[in-house]
């Protein structure tokens, strides 16, 4: 838009992605006056694309990932923190890696699982209209972030989120809402103020990497409404962060073969002298056993399982992020990982089932 006429208008029927934006620049924007755009910065959805617009963007510019602020639960910091340093990318449901999220600056490590602390951090660190990744715990009814006094065992789950929503809509008093949340009126008013600050950010995405929330469409919608984001995303199965230990490199092929024979069902990747073996028995927990013949073997295996562009060399410690149904691991770089993610979007509220056998309330 200039200070006189409007130029290069374009209307898309549906969401815009990197490919459509690229086509818009080439077909609509550049032809208006290419010389005036040389070296320009174009702001799109809160992010900057820099370059000379006479011609095509470079591949690097075309695949620029959105920045997000990452907030990490204290019980996961020892695994999730090193993992995101190795692989600073969080996939979304999109097949296009240009739509995935990358940390905007340092990760924010929370001290507790108190909802108020997390809301205060989001209000301070997140950008208006930006994206947020919450690395924590959950279940099919919501997030494991406790409200008020931890001893009251009230979390940001469906019942609590519904109570807060009814209060914000004017259908329930502050006093009644505070009772449902098992907290005092003053404490609820403080919490309500924190909620409103986060909602006022108008976040685009809130991606929760927390177990099972995606199993329930109503709970997903409740989380989307609570954060007032355009999209709330979470997995429908369990979420896991951890370390993959493979010890010293095994240069004797016979020793590698012996390990494989002792671990029936182990996955073996690569060919000698660069093989990597991975074994896991999820009936006994998420711990795994691995073996590597070389740094190349370890790196090649990690490159096939984790998101691209990582900092793992095969010689440093390997951390992972995976989803699991307790039958197998689906690592963050695999397409099935994205298939296990569910999204709830603004304005799409699912119908709720009514239990006709439930007692009537008075």
Image (cartoon, grey):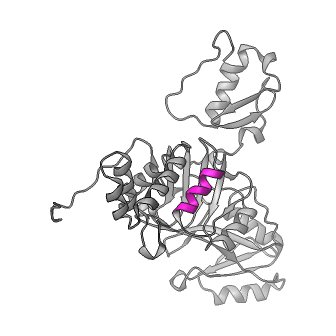
Position of 299 with respect to 335 (left or right) is: right
Residue 121: within the magenta?
yes
- For the C terminus, the image quarter is bottom left
Please say if 54 is above or below 116. above
Q: Residue at x 67, y 31 (%)?
A: 22
Q: Position of residue 88 (x, y in %)?
A: 72, 58
Can I make out residue 210 in this image?
A: yes
Where 334 sits versus 11, above or below?
below
Q: Who is closer to the viewer here, 293 or 139?
A: 139
Left or right: residue 46 compared with residue 337? right
User: Which residue, as the protein is rendered here, is positioned at the far top?
Assistant: 4
Q: Looking at the picture, does residue 242 appear above or below residue 11?
A: below
Give me the residue at 74% from left, 35% from top.
Answer: 49
Residue 3 included in the magenta stretch of the image = no
Residue 319: quadrant of the picture: bottom right
Q: Which residue is depicted at the point 60% across and 51% down?
A: 123
Q: Quadrant of residue 313?
A: bottom right
Secondary structure character of the magenta stretch overall: helix
What residue range appears in magenta?
Answer: 116-125
Which image quarter is the N terminus in? top right
Residue at point 72% right, 80% down? 245
| Residue 9 position within the rendered picture, expressed as x and y whole percent measured from the top left | 60, 18
Between 28 and 294, the one nearer to me in the picture: 28
Residue 299 relative to residue 156: left or right: right
Asked if residue 93 can be seen in this view, the reply is: no
Q: Position of residue 334 (x, y in %)?
A: 61, 60
- Residue 213, percent from left and from top: 45, 62
Number of residue marks = 0
């Amino acid at each position: 838009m200039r200070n006189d006429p409007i130029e290069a208008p374009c209307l898309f029927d549906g969401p815009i992605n990197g490919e459509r934006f690229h086509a818009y620049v080439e077909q609509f924007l550049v032809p208006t006056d290419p010389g005036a755009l040389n070296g320009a910065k174009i702001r799109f959805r809160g992010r900057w694309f820099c370059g000379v617009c006479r011609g095509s963007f470079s591949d690097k510019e075309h695949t620029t990932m959105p920045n997000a602020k990452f907030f990490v639960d204290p019980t996961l910091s020892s695994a999730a923190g090193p993992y995101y340093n190795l692989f600073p990318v969080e996939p979304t449901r999109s097949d296009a890696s240009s739509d995935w999220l990358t940390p905007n600056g340092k990760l924010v490590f929370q001290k507790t699982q108190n909802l108020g602390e997390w809301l205060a951090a989001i209000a301070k660190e997140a950008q208006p209209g930006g994206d947020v990744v919450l690395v924590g715990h959950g279940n099919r009814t919501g997030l494991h972030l406790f409200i008020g006094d931890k001893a009251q065992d009230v979390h940001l789950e469906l019942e609590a989120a519904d109570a807060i929503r009814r209060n914000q809509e004017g259908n329930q008093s502050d006093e009644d809402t505070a009772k449902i949340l098992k907290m005092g009126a003053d404490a609820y008013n403080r919490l309500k103020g924190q909620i409103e600050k986060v909602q006022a950010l108008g976040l685009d995405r809130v991606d929760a990497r927390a177990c099972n929330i995606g199993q329930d469409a109503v709970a997903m919608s409740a989380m989307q409404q609570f954060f007032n984001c355009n999209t709330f995303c979470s997995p429908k199965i369990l979420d896991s962060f951890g370390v993959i230990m493979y010890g010293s490199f095994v240069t004797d092929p016979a020793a590698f073969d012996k390990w494989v024979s002792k671990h029936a069902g182990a996955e073996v990747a690569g060919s000698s002298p660069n093989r990597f073996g991975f074994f896991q028995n999820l009936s006994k927990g998420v711990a795994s056993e691995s073996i590597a013949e070389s740094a190349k073997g370890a790196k090649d295996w990690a490159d096939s399982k984790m998101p691209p562009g990582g900092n793992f060399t095969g010689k440093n410690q390997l951390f992972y992020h995976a989803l699991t149904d307790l039958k197998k691991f689906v690592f963050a770089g695999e397409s099935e990982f994205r298939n296990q993610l569910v999204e709830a979007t603004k304005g799409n509220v699912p119908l709720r089932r009514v239990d006709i056998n439930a007692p009537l309330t008075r």
